[in-house]
Image (cartoon, rainbow, N blue to C red):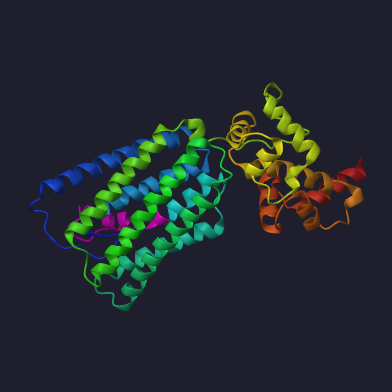
Amino acid sequence: MGDFEIGLSLRRASGSQAHMTVLDQLDQMARGGAMALLALWSWVLLRDHWHDLSARLAAAMNAGIACYLIVTAGWFAAPNLAGLAFALGAGATPGLFWLFAKAWFNDEVQVAPTGAALVAGSVANTLVVQLTFPGGGMANTISAALFQLSMLGFAAAALWEVWRSREGDLVEPRRRVRPVLVCVVALYVIAIAFIEVTSGPRPPGRFWQQAVSIGAVCATFGFCAAMLRMRQADLFGPAPAAVTATRPAPGASDDPLAARLLQFMASQLPHRDETLSIARLAAQLGEQEYRLRRTINGQLGHRNFAAFLNGYRLAEVKAALADPRQKDVPIITIALDAGFGSLGPFNRAFRAAEGMTPSAFRARALADSEIG
């Protein structure tokens, strides 16, 4: 399909590849190495972590990055279906990065229909851009502008996901990756925006094309290297069972801090405070925050603080829903009293844990109590 500059301007770059400079040759070699690294990492992810949503999304994102590296290398001299397929894969990359960031940093177990629809819409818009290039007139102009806006939007949304949940992340290596990822992606997006503004309606110059492409290759190398360095248990871990006062974690009694934490959670019920942070909980226990993080993650098996608290909140909600004496108490009241800040997060957490709505759970529990 020619030199598709996905993420830059989606305009065909000009210039012949008949005379490749040393920089061009290094660029091609670096692209090949980056794609080999992406393929290796994707194979490891799918082999060892197929059950994990974030691993599958990472593999899909890697495929999109590889498509971007191929598309911007100018390996297709004429429009063809293969080039179109690679362009669509590259166009999906910003959305896949957003979904990956949501799933990995928040330990999500499924993609929301809204998120899937947004990514599918961005791919469809990329198809319009390619089919209307170069003489598509207003349709091409609008779709290209929408692509650039969606790229910036997905990048901003991903960075927000990375940043907003940093406080509750209990996996230390993953916490260290967050600020690095934010800086790299932010700088890359700023560079692309700068090139777009300074280029105006003209395609970016060859120097800027190579600079951004080489930057993408270096970022790919760095990201893959950082992921491969992390322990597999830290990179992707199974969703832990809820730890409650009635079901303490295995081995928790062997750790003094873990035992004291579980006793404090059961007696003082701090989870009922919807604003509770790990720093405040550490202060209430009189412990250093880093020790509490390591205990909740290493001894109790939780990867984020919200999941740890929600285990207690859901246990309290389920007990109240199954209590015939509270059958007339509104579900929202029970959820708020247990520490959930609003109905939306409560419903999502409850469905994820029980596979049914709170109303259905209450109806079944009360029916069982009447039979018993």
- In this image, 344 relative to 204: left or right? right
Residue 184 lies within the magenta run: no
Indicate the position of residue 191 as horizontal and vertical percent values: 31, 58
Indicate the position of residue 329 as horizontal and vertical percent values: 86, 56
Residue 37 showing in the rendered view = yes
Q: Residue at x 32, y 67 (%)?
A: 129
Please state, as top left, top right, bottom left or bottom right, where the C terminus lies in the image: top right
Instruction: Quadrant for residue 251, please give it.
Output: top right
Q: Residue at x 31, y 72 (%)?
A: 140
Q: In the image, which residues are magenta?
A: 73-94
Furthest residue to the bottom? 138
Q: Residue at x 67, y 36 (%)?
A: 241
Most common secondary structure along the magenta stretch: helix
- In this image, 307 relative to 122: left or right? right
Indicate the position of residue 185 as horizontal and vertical percent values: 38, 52
Q: Is residue 348 above or below residue 203?
A: above
Question: Which of 239/311 is in front?
Answer: 311
Furthest residue to the left? 19
Indicate the position of residue 157 as horizontal and vertical percent values: 48, 58
Please state, as top left, top right, bottom left or bottom right, where the N terminus lies in the image: bottom left
